[in-house]
Image (cartoon, rainbow, N blue to C red):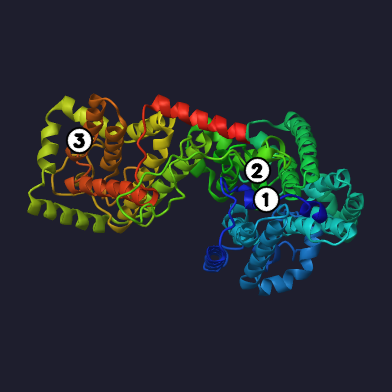
């Protein structure tokens, strides 16, 4: 297997492709990048150790405590499955029992460091398994990138936290496929892995149909021998596991728990029970297994063995009765597959896989009832897609090594010598991939919401005293500058019903609608300007988050005794200690700088620069003026908050200019669109 993999053509690490350049990077930058990545690996490992061992005993390594602790199931003389707390196979229990005493003595440091070593070994083998020959850059960077992604992944973090052994079967399979010498040794390792996790028997037909029949037979014999040994040593437990629980079904938490990302768990969550659910699970599981094995065999014959292994592992997740979070590492290995003929599409699959495997599903999809079936089964969907649906490129495709390149606009000379600082971030003429943009926008907004909440220590009312003190500072500064108009504007608007309603609507609604509308129009009509404007908005938002963190500020409506009226949220009960807690999803003291005004100013400037008609430009510039009036009149911001919003937006545009240089002037958007299509057509013909 390893020899077949090493006979292939060059491949980049983890599906990434260098577009439009075949130059070999110089040694010094590569070494610096490699050193930086290894330092990141060390930092991630140190953080994992600190998080796990810094937690009081009894709250960490709970699964390990359940197994080998003083009252653990491996000490019990009765059945391992009396309490359903032990979810491993009888062979797993047989292997762990002799380790009980040593595991008790090394329940913290030894077990955690041992798990980290397994993760490092897994990353090194996965990096070594990339199709050969590989570029020098890939050879240097693949291992630290792989280990970093593994350590960031939810399965590994869950394994470290719970004290699980689920990394061992994955490592045994990779060792059998890529490091073992001889088919018998390969089959022996994979057979032991299957004895620990039975659905990994799917690798047996993969070995058989790819010509590794001795390895397939060795896998089956090893599995049968390990299972028979456990049956002879623990017949009662083996009967309960294989017959009563049908290969582990029903052990652990409820099968319809959100953590069970198998097809069986998804069907139960959809409301199917009884014989109908079982029949549907068996039929769909068999179909998935057949389709996945066919795809895996094709990948193997094409020289993409790592992808073939990942596809088979993803199929094992789908067809397993229970696939808990710490058992889902196979999905992350599928990042090695390449998808997309165009360079702009090449990163969609790896980015989506990394996000699914490293972030909670609530950060990837909004909390909407209509999206619940997808959000609660997101890892299962990724595994199912990798096993049966994702159109991975064959190495015989002309686009596998050389995707259709991205077209860049000609550079515009800058007034300053060292601008742009990052010329490789040139202005792209074509639209970015829409799915990738939506993913990044969603994740960015979720992170923005989390940082806003965390800026006061994780609870909205935690920073109340500091926020009110900062509010008094801002008010004092405004009085010194004679711009403290908030009280007058607020009380004036309150007396005029229609004006108050208009300000409330403007404040509550257009904050999100206007920027999203401008982004959508730019994406559709002016793709060359979309990236420039989107980058400026993203940088401004990041700078604003730093402001929220460093300077929590109470808005006028949350300043007691000053007499401001909250026209949007109603009267606040200042006698309650958490009166500022209007919602659990946002930080009420994230007022400086004002992103209400900052985002509206961004909209106005973009429209003023790009619009062709004067009246559209005028409307664009009118929007931030109306927003400033609304945020002050509704007592939701101080005047200086708007100044702060203007500063971060100006810094966003300035940093984009410094990094990428001046914006390339564009003509009629219809001409720009035609030019982009023509560039794409020429690229297609050239390929």
Q: Are marks 1 and 2 in contact (CB under 8 Å)?
A: yes
Is the C terminus in the top left, top right, bottom left or bottom right quadrant? top right
SS of the residue under disc 1 = loop
Report x, y in % for residue 119. 66, 62
Q: Residue at x 12, y 51 (%)?
A: 478
| Mark 3 or 1, closer to the camera | 1
SS of the residue under disc 3 = helix
- Choose between 344 and 2: the one closer to the eye: 344
The residue that label 2 is drawn on is 338
The residue that label 1 is drawn on is 11
- First in residue order: circle 3 vs circle 2: 2
Q: CA distance from mark 3 to mark 2?
A: 48 Å
The residue that label 3 is drawn on is 625
Q: Residues within 10 Å of mark 1 (few under 14, many from 20)?
A: many
The number of numbered badges drawn on the structure is: 3
SS of the residue under disc 2 = loop
Report x, y in % for residue 494. 14, 33
- Choose between 517 and 627: the one closer to the eye: 517
Relative to residue 425, is residue 339 drawn left or right? right
Report x, y in % for residue 292. 76, 39
- Choose between 60 and 406: the one closer to the eye: 406
């Amino acid at each position: 297997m390893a020899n077949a993999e090493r006979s292939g053509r060059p491949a980049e690490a983890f599906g990434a492709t260098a577009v439009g350049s075949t130059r070999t990077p110089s040694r010094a930058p590569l070494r610096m990048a490699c050193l930086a990545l290894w330092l990141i690996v060390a930092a991630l490992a140190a953080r994992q150790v600190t998080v796990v061992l810094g937690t009081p005993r009894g709250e960490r390594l709970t699964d390990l405590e359940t197994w080998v602790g003083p009252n653990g199931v491996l000490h019990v003389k009765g059945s391992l499955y009396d309490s359903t707390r032990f979810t491993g196979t009888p062979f797993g229990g047989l292997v762990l029992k002799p380790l009980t005493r040593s595991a008790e003595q090394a329940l913290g440091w030894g077990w955690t460091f041992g798990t980290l070593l397994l993760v490092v070994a897994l990353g090194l083998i996965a990096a070594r398994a990339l199709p050969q020959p590989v570029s020098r850059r890939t050879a240097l960077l693949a291992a630290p990138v792989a280990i970093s992604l593994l350590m960031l992944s939810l399965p590994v973090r869950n394994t470290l936290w719970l004290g699980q052994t689920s990394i061992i079967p994955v490592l045994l399979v990779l060792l059998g496929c890529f490091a073992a010498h001889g088919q018998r040794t390969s089959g022996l390792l994979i057979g032991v892995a299957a004895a620990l996790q039975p659905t990994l028997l799917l690798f047996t037909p993969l070995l058989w149909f790819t010509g590794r029949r001795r390895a397939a037979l060795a896998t089956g014999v090893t599995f049968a021998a390990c299972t028979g040994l456990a049956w002879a040593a623990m017949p009662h437990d083996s009967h309960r596991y294989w017959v009563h629980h049908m290969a582990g079904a029903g052990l652990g938490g409820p099968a319809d728990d959100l953590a069970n990302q198998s097809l069986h768990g998804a069907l139960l969550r959809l409301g199917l029970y009884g014989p109908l659910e079982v029949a549907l699970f068996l039929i769909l599981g068999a179909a998935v297994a057949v389709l996945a094995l066919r795809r895996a065999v094709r990948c193997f014959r094409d020289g993409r063995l790592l992808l073939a292994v990942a596809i088979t592992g993803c199929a094992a997740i789908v067809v397993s009765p229970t696939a808990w979070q710490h058992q889902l590492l196979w999905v992350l290995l599928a990042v090695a597959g390449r998808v997309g003929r165009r360079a702009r599409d090449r990163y969609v699959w790896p980015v989506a896989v990394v996000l699914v495997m490293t972030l909670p599903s609530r950060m990837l999809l909004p909390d909407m009832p209509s999206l619940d079936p997808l959000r609660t089964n997101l890892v299962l969907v990724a595994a199912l897609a990798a096993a049966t649906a994702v159109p991975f490129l064959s190495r015989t495709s002309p686009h596998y090594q050389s995707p259709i390149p991205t077209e860049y606009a000609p550079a515009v000379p800058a007034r300053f010598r060292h601008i742009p600082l990052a010329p490789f971030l040139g202005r792209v003429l074509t639209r970015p991939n829409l799915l990738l943009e939506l993913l990044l926008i969603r994740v960015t907004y979720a992170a923005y919401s989390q940082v806003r909440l965390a800026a006061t220590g994780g609870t909205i009312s935690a920073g109340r005293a500091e926020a009110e003190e900062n509010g008094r500072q801002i008010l004092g500064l405004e009085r010194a500058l004679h711009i403290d108009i908030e009280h007058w504007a607020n009380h004036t608007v309150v007396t005029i019903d229609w004006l108050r309603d208009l300000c409330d609507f403007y404040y509550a609604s257009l904050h999100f609608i206007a920027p999203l509308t401008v982004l959508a129009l730019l994406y559709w009509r002016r793709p060359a300007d979309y990236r420039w404007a989107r980058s400026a908005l993203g940088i401004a938002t990041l700078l604003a988050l730093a402001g929220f963190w460093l300077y929590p500020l109470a808005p006028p409506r949350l300043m007691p005794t000053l007499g401001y009226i909250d026209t949007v949220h109603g009267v606040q009960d200042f006698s309650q200690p958490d009166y500022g807690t209007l919602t659990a999803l946002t930080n009420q003291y994230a007022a400086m700088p004002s992103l209400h005004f900052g985002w509206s100013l961004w909209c106005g400037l973009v429209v003023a620069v790009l619009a062709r008609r004067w009246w559209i430009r005028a409307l664009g510039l009118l929007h931030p003026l109306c927003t400033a009036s609304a945020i002050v009149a509704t007592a939701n911001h101080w005047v200086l908050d708007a100044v702060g919003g203007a500063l971060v937006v100006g810094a966003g545009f300035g940093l984009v200019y410094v990094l990428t240089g001046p914006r390339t002037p564009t003509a009629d958007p219809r001409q720009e669109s035609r030019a982009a299509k023509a560039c794409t057509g020429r690229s297609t013909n050239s390929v």
